[in-house]
Amino acid sequence: MNEMIRYFQDGGFWMYPILAASAFAVAIVLERVVYYYIHCRVNAKALLTEVTKLVRNGDAEKARKLCASMKNPLAQTVEAAIWHFIQNESDQEIQNGVDEVGLRELPRIQRRTHYLGLFANMATLLGLLGTIFGLQQAFGAIATVDPSQKASILAHGINVAMNTTSLGLIVAVPCMIAFSMLGAKANSIIEEIDESSVRLLNFLFSLRQE
């Protein structure tokens, strides 16, 4: 613990903005993990099977209420399709209703993940900036400082340079990994919604032709 404190103190001022970037990144990762893996968690196949069974049996309103109770993007999209179907609207109007919900829900799925890439770049650049200031301090000590103080100032400048660079990379690498993983999860959820929407719409449209 003392080594970590010393490591942070030796890095100087630039360690603080890097640490702040990491704190924001952690908050975003936690919020997105909860949203993706808890709020958006749903068995799409089981939901569509249950919904299509209810609609085919004439219980479309029950199917709509089932989706309304789930409060996730896929269920909201399915609910919109069933609601417009219950209103006996045209196929195009049902499609428009689904598209409208998609325009509202899909940005929520992708929200804030792009900031992880920003914080990764910020941490790297702040680390490099700290490196430059640390090296300036170290080289300045060689030219201008009293010989008896050169060693300590040179060591401090090198510590600033190395510690800020290392902390910047320590923050940036996990941010990029999280950005990639959460982005892939968001795309997976969107693809699942698109596929399920198409399957449901095809089912609803086919019912009218029977």
Image: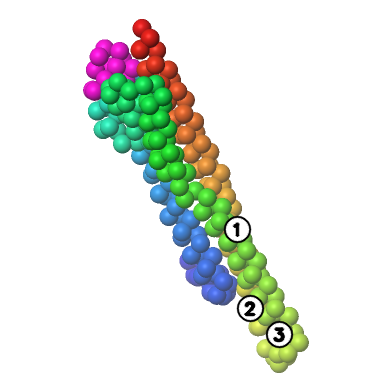
What x and y, as percent, mark residue 88? 30, 21
Q: From the image, give the main secondary structure of the stretch colored magenta.
A: helix
Q: Earlier in the sequence, mark 2 or mark 3?
A: 3
- Secondary structure of residue under mark 3: helix
Residue type highlighted by circle 3: Ala
Q: Which residue is mark 3?
A: 141
What x and y, as percent, mark residue 6? 53, 72
Instruction: Please name whichever residue, 97 or 62, is drawn nearer the observer in this view of the structure.
Output: 97
Dot 3, how many residues are within 10 Å of its Cα: few (below 14), some (14-19), or many (20+)?
many
Highlighted range, magenta: 50-63
What x and y, as percent, mark residue 171? 55, 58
Instruction: Please name whichever residue, 199 or 88, is drawn nearer the observer in this view of the structure.
Output: 88
Residue type highlighted by circle 1: Asn
Q: CA distance from mark 3 to mark 1?
A: 30 Å
One can see residue 43 in this view = no
- Secondary structure of residue under mark 1: helix
